[in-house]
Image (spheres, rainbow, N blue to C red):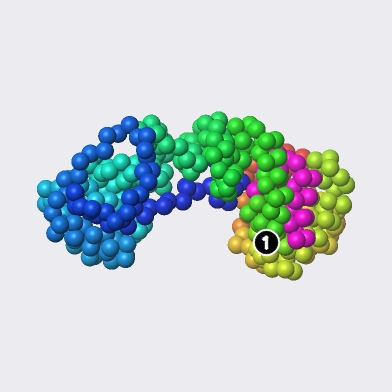
Amino acid sequence: MKHTPLFTMLAAAALAFTFAAPPVHAAGAAKDTKQEALYPNATRVAPKLDLTSEKEQKALNEGLDAVNGGDKAKAEQILQPIIDGSKSKYAQAIALQGLANVSYNAGDVKAAIPLLKRAIDIGVMPNDTYFQLMYEMAQLYAADQQYQASLDTIAKWRAEGKRESADSYGLEGMDYYRLEKYPEAIAAIQKAKSLTDKPQDSWNQILMASYAESGKGGDAAKMATAEYEKNPADSSMLHNASAVLLQQQDYAGAIKVLEQGRANGALKDEGDWINLVKAYLLQAQNGGGDPKAGSTKALQVFDDGMAKGAIKSSAENYKLAGDAAVIGENDAKAIGYYQKGAALASDGELDVAVGRVYFQQQKFGEARKYVTQGIGKGVKHKGQAYMVLAEADRQLKDKPGAITAMMEAAKDPETASKAKEWLRKSNVGK
């Protein structure tokens, strides 16, 4: 199953990968301040540190300063020898976490993961450092799309560290969503939101997407609309709300929020402008009003978007406008839009569309001209285009031209049956 393409920020939780900053102290050295333990109830017994060399302590701190200063070469030059040759397991672990940070800062998550795992597996970190690194590990797994590994690591972090946080449940919800375990994702995000009064925007997006994917589209629509109403000037919220409403085929609801966004300036994305055009057409075509009225409103939005530069000139966009004009039986506008699109197109589809409109107007000479032009540029449904050309030729009393065009239509499997029947009735080939 593919993920619902509704939301704008369904990314991994932001990584707070900044663990290399604290200075390293040799075992038994006095610290200036005493910090409150982050994991006071942890089941893990904190190990005794084995770093006794002040020289190595100084080297580690210089290496970590280089990490935090973005000096990759210096950090590697100092820390790699400690990893390779130190007798202190603690020193090796600290150096490994430093180089993991170097890899992460360079954008190489795959390289950071085994380095950080080695640091954790050595097992000599103090509890606060050990569990913070374990949580960072879960985030790295998620960033590398190893979602089950991320979930397993979060579970271990909670079980051994005896700590919960809103962010950890938010990360869990994202992992479950990516694994298409939507009920679990919903439960995790709801738990995350219950633990804080400042939920991340991405959590709501994951929750809405999980509702939609698990058949609870109505809940997703209600939630998306409610979130947008809290922030009516937020373009991303507008996008989310309208996308969910359109998926639920609530065209009136989608039009309402999109028009509100158009009025207050939140309607900025070209895709959302196009969705508003389509919403008016879909509403009219599905019993929600007069097709001509829907076409008129759709084209008003299209022209407004073009005038504001929000809708770009493209063959695809002009085709949509031309189709809308056809639905509204406004042939002149349809021809105008199609011709503008044809000038930008890489094929002849819109030339054929112009020819079809002229054919409906019984302007068969113009129809023949544009259909022929379109076929010359190349079209997907060549047989259908030749059948329109054959009928135009027939109306123009050009029987040889009509026969030639219909013989071409007979070569296309899509139109072969109808074309051959036409030829049979016209006594061709007998």
If the image is split into quadrants, where does the C terminus sit? top right
Tell me: residue 385, above or below residue 311.
Answer: above
Q: Residue at x 24, y 65 (%)?
A: 73
Left or right placement of residue 140 versus residue 28 in this view: right
Q: Residue at x 23, y 39 (%)?
A: 47
Q: Is residue 242 left or right of residue 285?
A: left
Closer to the camera, 115 or 385?
115
Q: In the image, is residue 156 above or below residue 138? A: above
Check residue 163 for magenta coloring. Answer: no
Q: Which residues are magenta?
A: 240-264
Whether residue 59 is visible: yes
Closest to the observer: 345 or 86? Answer: 86
Instruction: Give the dominant element type of the magenta stretch: helix, strand or loop.
Output: helix
Across and down, in percent, residue 112 comes to: 31, 50
Provide the secondary structure element on which disc 1 rests: loop
Decide if residue 245 is on the left or right side of residue 67. Answer: right
In the depicted structure, whether residue 342 falls above or below residue 181: below
Residue nearest the observer in this picture, 92 or 302: 92
Q: Identify the residue at image location x=69%, y=53%.
A: 231
| Residue 136, percent from left and from top | 37, 46
In the picture of the structure, the residue carrying the numbered disc 1 is: 268
Tell me the kind of residue under disc 1.
Answer: Lys
Q: Residue at horizontal 27%, vertical 59%?
A: 64
